[in-house]
Amino acid sequence: MNINQARITRFESDLRSAFQVGHLHIEDESHLHAGHAGAASGGGHFKLTIVAPEFEGMTKVARHRAIYAALNSHFPDAIHALTILAYTPSESTH
């Protein structure tokens, strides 16, 4: 297991503790940013897709804030950049 796979396992655990996750997928996109100045810090680039009922009635910004709060301990050492797709069960195609 490489370092980012281990990180993803920890991210998933924290997200499942914070939300009633219906669907969760975290993709390591670090390879797309190799050589980028931010990548030199050691933090990875990740794409997160999550479906949870807690997002009902929340704006996109509020959803992102809730996710950042759940993953707060991973910034900036493990996460340099995070793309977030957050849906309620009724919005999800998963």
Image: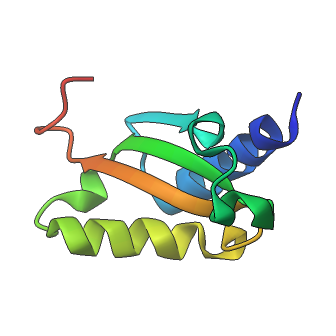
Most foreground residue, 21 or 2: 2
Q: Is residue 86 above or below residue 23?
A: below
Most foreground residue, 33 or 55: 33
x, y percentage for residue 43? 73, 60
Question: Which residue appears at 55% of the width and 46% of the height?
Answer: 46
Q: Is residue 1 above or below residue 76?
A: above
Q: How many marks?
A: 0
Direction from residue 83 to residue 52 in the image, left or right: left
Based on the displayed image, in which of its 4 quarters is residue 34 positioned?
top right
Most foreground residue, 2 or 70: 2
Q: Is residue 32 above or below residue 60?
A: above
x, y percentage for residue 23? 40, 33
Most foreground residue, 47 or 71: 47
**Residue closest to the far top:** 94
Direction from residue 43 to residue 64 in the image, left or right: left
Direction from residue 91 to residue 33 in the image, left or right: right
x, y percentage for residue 41? 78, 67
x, y percentage for residue 86? 29, 50
Question: Which residue appears at 34% of the width and 67% of the height?
Answer: 64
Q: Quadrant of the C terminus?
A: top left
Q: Is residue 73 above or below residue 50?
A: below
